[in-house]
Every structure is written in structure tokens, then in C-alpha cells.
Image (tube, rainbow, N blue to C red):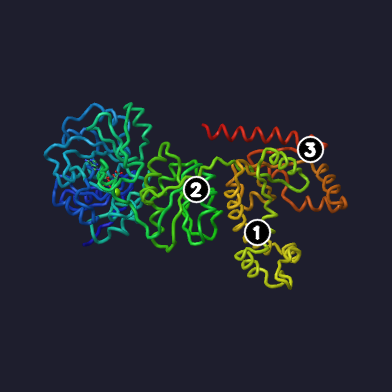
Amino acid sequence: METKWFTLRTVEDKESIAQAADILRRGGLLAIPTETVYGLGANGLDETAVLHIFEAKGRPQDNPLILHIPDASWLTRYCEDVPDAAYKLAERFWPGPLTMILKKKPCVPLRTTGGLETVGMRCPDHAVTRAIIEASGVPVAAPSANTSGRPSCTTAEHVREDMWGKIDGIVDGGPCQVGVESTIIDLTVTPPQLLRPGGLPLESLRDALGEVTVDKAVTQKMNDGEKPRAPGMKYRHYAPKAPVTVVTGGAKASARYLLTHAGEKSGIICFDEFTRLFDGHIVHPLGASDDKRAQAQHVFDALRTFDETNVGEIWAQCPDSKGLGLAIGNRLKKAAGFHVEDADDGKIVIGITGGTGAGKTSLLRALERKGACVLDCDAVYHEMLKDDEPLLRALREAFGDVIFRQDGSVDVHAIGLIVFKDRKKLAELDAIVHERIPRALAQKMAATNAEIIGLDAIKLIESGLGAICDATVAVTAPEEVRVKRIMARDSITEEYARSRIAAQKDADYFRAQCDYEFVNDLPTAEKAEHAAEVYINTIINNLKEETER
Ligand code: TXA
Ligand code: MG
């Protein structure tokens, strides 16, 4: 079959709209853009056309289709006993990502509704598509335009992958703005029930209607014999070859969890701020952890693109279930067959950074007195140099045999001499170390029973470790204070002390990169440690308040 492609971004393009509408009127199949996902549309009153939808998608016949209409005035043409609640919701949320289940009129064929006496009604927030439906004069039955079992299509290109040659036309109306399908609410029961979370948050429905219950299938795997109220909820959206594990919990805790558990061949779906921690993996960023709109837009794309890879398993970070998070989490969990692990272990990780002589030790001591487990990143690196095979292999590749002593141990001084003179080599060394250090530390964090963990790292930020700390603290002090401290501590000349300070990032850098700054210019260690204790308590209280909120 020849598939016609329409690039249609404006309702002014009357000619193309008329041609597209004509396909629908003649009983053809037309992929249409909506704000949620692309739909595979046909005249919902025409049984043969509807049958073709099921065939093109390979969709089970008992899975009903949604009817798309240009406005709420069309409701009474196809629905019986339309309750006030439907008009109330239409008034507030249409056009928009909301589908209402209502009692159907006899004109709507059972083939469209999968044999049910109810029908799903939706008015999409896409002007071009509404204009096409209007022009066709028929309600458009449209499931998501993906092949059954694949992730929904959020661009016309995705539709091309799945449907080219199988349907009459594809309307390219740009990428979908919402990215997950519509929210489905059943208005034929009291109280109304959420059947599928989607682009309109549950909170908005409750705000409009009061009590709204949630079908069990939204949050749990159905047991054999159990039936979700929306038949489509029993199917997996996407069954990748590799098993998917969804990790819930705070963004930082789940990032730490992924770091400890993901293996070399794991594919990663993570929030944007953590991508660099997974260098060396196939990574699909979901969006920033505080941007659920972006996450909704990316979730299907992330799942879809793993198809072309051969990762052994997939680990995915999951947002909390507020707002759009319920829908995003539901799609991820369905892809995972509800294989979910929770990362929240109640641990608090505080990263301490700052230049030499700034006085990090005061904060670290204060942490230790609170029972914290303090991890020194430098020490962990030196430990790894003893026996971490992948690290040693990477160093040998980058620097050759000259950095190894006769007994096979690494000569750190020799590495120092090379990178001191060669910026490119320094960057190479950093890349090698930073790719491995966060994982090693995450494993140590997971292994300790301590509730509070302190990380001591000059390169907290550059290594990517800062991203998995619940709080980061820059320790700063005036240069004169630092010079005196280093001279006394390391018995070196003033000139050398100054050159060491000059070789490091300055206080402004640390200040800008961290959540907190501790100015450690106190004259004695005792005073500094007392101030540090007060400071640490404040940070911990802030973090505890944050998680309670
Ligand atoms: O955002 C959307 O809703 C997209 C775009 C294209 O509008 N459409 C969509 O359709 O997601 P589809 O067919 O992929 O999903 C429709 C879901 C299925 O889970 C189906 O079982 C459920 O809606 N559904 C449809 N009619 C129903 C009814 N009468 N009672 C219960 N569930 C129904
Ligand atoms: Mg679908």
C-alpha cells in the first residue's frame, strides 16, 4: 500500500487538511498527531475501517479504541446519559490529555469498543487534528499508532518505522508535547475511577470531582485471571529483550543504587544530572529529576531506542508518583513487568570539598563524631591502584609500562610527572579515574551501616560524585590562612605553599558548585571543629525536613 506523507503544521493548510479528512471519510487509515502520542485513526462508526486498525497494529480484538472528537458538543451523538461530571471535565480540561469512559449509543459499533457497552471519548489538544476530524465529519477511532507491544510513537518518524506501507497516510504535526497517553477516567461508576494515568494528573481530576478511585492495574501487576478495567492495561507496552528494573526512591538515592547495581553491559535510563556517572554505558536521559514534563516527553523514546542495542539488562530511575510522575512511572513499570526495587535506605550523603589548607578536616571530624562513615576518595583511589584490574588496564593503555614498577605496582609519582607537563594526559587520567571512582564509592556507601556518610574529595564535582550527594559543602578560607596552615602541616616553604594553592581551583569555583559554603577561618582547630559541628547539624536538619516535605 502506498502511504501518503502530510507535513501539516497549521490549520491554514486547507488543501492538505481536506485530503487527509478524505482518507478518513473513505474508510482509510490515517496516522494523526495529538498532544499525547500519535494515533492511528479511522472512522469509528465504520466497522471495516476499524477492523483495519486492529490488523495494521496487530492489536487484540478485545482491546477497545478511543473516539476522538473536535469538541464536547459531539458527545451526545455517540454517548447516552452523559453525566454533568463529563461536561465539567470537558469545560476544564478539553481539548487536552483526558479520555472519559461513557455509556455508548447503538450507533457506535461493538467492534470499536471491543464488545463493551461503554466508549472512551477524547478531544485532543492538536488544532490540525481537530480540523481534520471536523472536516471528515466522523468521530475518529484512534489507538496509539505503534505496532501492538511496542512503545507509543511520539514523532511522525516513529510512526513511519512501524506503519509505512501499511496505512493510507501519516500526518506529521511535529513531536508530541506531552509524550504519554491521555489519562482515562471511567464516569460510568461512582465514584469515578482512574483506569490509566496519563498526561492529566490525578490531582487535577480530584480537584474537579472530589473522590476519584484508582484501578489496581495502575500500580500493580495483575495476577492471572484478574482483569484491569481498561483492557489495554493488561498488555505490556514494550517487552525489551533485556529485562528492565525500575528503581524508585529519591533521585540521588536511586542514582547511587544504579551505580552499585548496574553491570558493565547494563543500559541506563536516568535523570539528566546523572548521565556522566554512567560513561561507558548506553544511557538514555529521561529529563532533569525535577522536570516531569521533560520526562514524560522522553520516556517512550528512551524505551524505544534500546531496541537497536544489545544491552543485557536495563536499569531505570523512576520519578515519584505526584503529578505526571504517576503516568511516567506506570509506563516504566509496565515495560519492566512491574519489576521494581526501592532505593530509599534512609542514608544521608554529605560531600565535602575545597582546596588544600581550607580546613575540610574540621567538617570531617565533626561528621565522625556524629557516627558518620567518612570516605576519603584519594584513599579509595590508591586502594584501587593495588588491585582494580579494569583501572590498571586502562592506565596501562593510556600511559604504557613506564608507570609500573618492577613488582607490578603503580608508580603514582611517575604518573604525576607525565600529567604535570601534559594537559591532554591529565584530562585522560581524570577521565579514567572519574569513570570508576563514583562506582567504587557507591559500593562502599551501600556496604556501610552508618546512616550518615561523609565524602572527602577535592574533585567532588569534576568526578561527578557531587551529583549523588544529598548535600555538598565547599570549605573555603582566606589565602593567608591557608598558606600558614599548609606550611605548618607539611613543613614547606611559603613559596611552595602558594604555588600549590595557585594550582587548584579557587574558592569562587567551589562556592558556585556546592549547596553550602563553610568558611573555615577560625584560629584554632578546637573552635573550627565546634563551628563545624553546628554547621553539620544544620545541614542534616535541612535534609531531614526536605524529605519529610
Ligand atoms: O492519548 C491517547 O489516549 C492516545 C491518543 C492517540 O489519543 N490513544 C491511546 O489509545 O492511547 P490506545 O488504544 O493505545 O489506548 C486506549 C486505552 C486502552 O488501554 C483501552 O483498553 C482503553 O483505553 N479503553 C478504551 N475504551 C475503553 C472502554 N470503553 N472501557 C475501558 N477502557 C477503555
Ligand atoms: Mg497504546
Q: Amino acid at mark 3?
A: Asp
Residue sitting nearer the eye, 329 or 49: 329
Which residue is under mark 2?
271
Classify the position of ligand 1 by quadrant: top left, top right, bottom left or bottom right: top left
Distance from disc 1 to disc 3, alpha carbons, whole Å, reads 30 Å
Residue appearing at x 62%, y 61% in the figure = 432
**Figure label count:** 3
Q: Which sits earlier in the primary sequence, circle 1 or circle 3?
A: 1
Residue sitting nearer the eye, 217 or 10: 217
Q: Circle 3 — which element?
A: loop
Question: What quarter of the picture does the N terminus occupy?
Answer: bottom left
Q: Circle 2 — which element?
A: loop
The dot on residue 521 is: 3
Q: Is residue 391 above or below residue 192?
A: below
The reply to whether residue 130 is visible in this rendering is no
Left or right: 249, with 196 as reference point:
right
Residue 190 appears at what percent x and percent y?
Answer: 25, 29
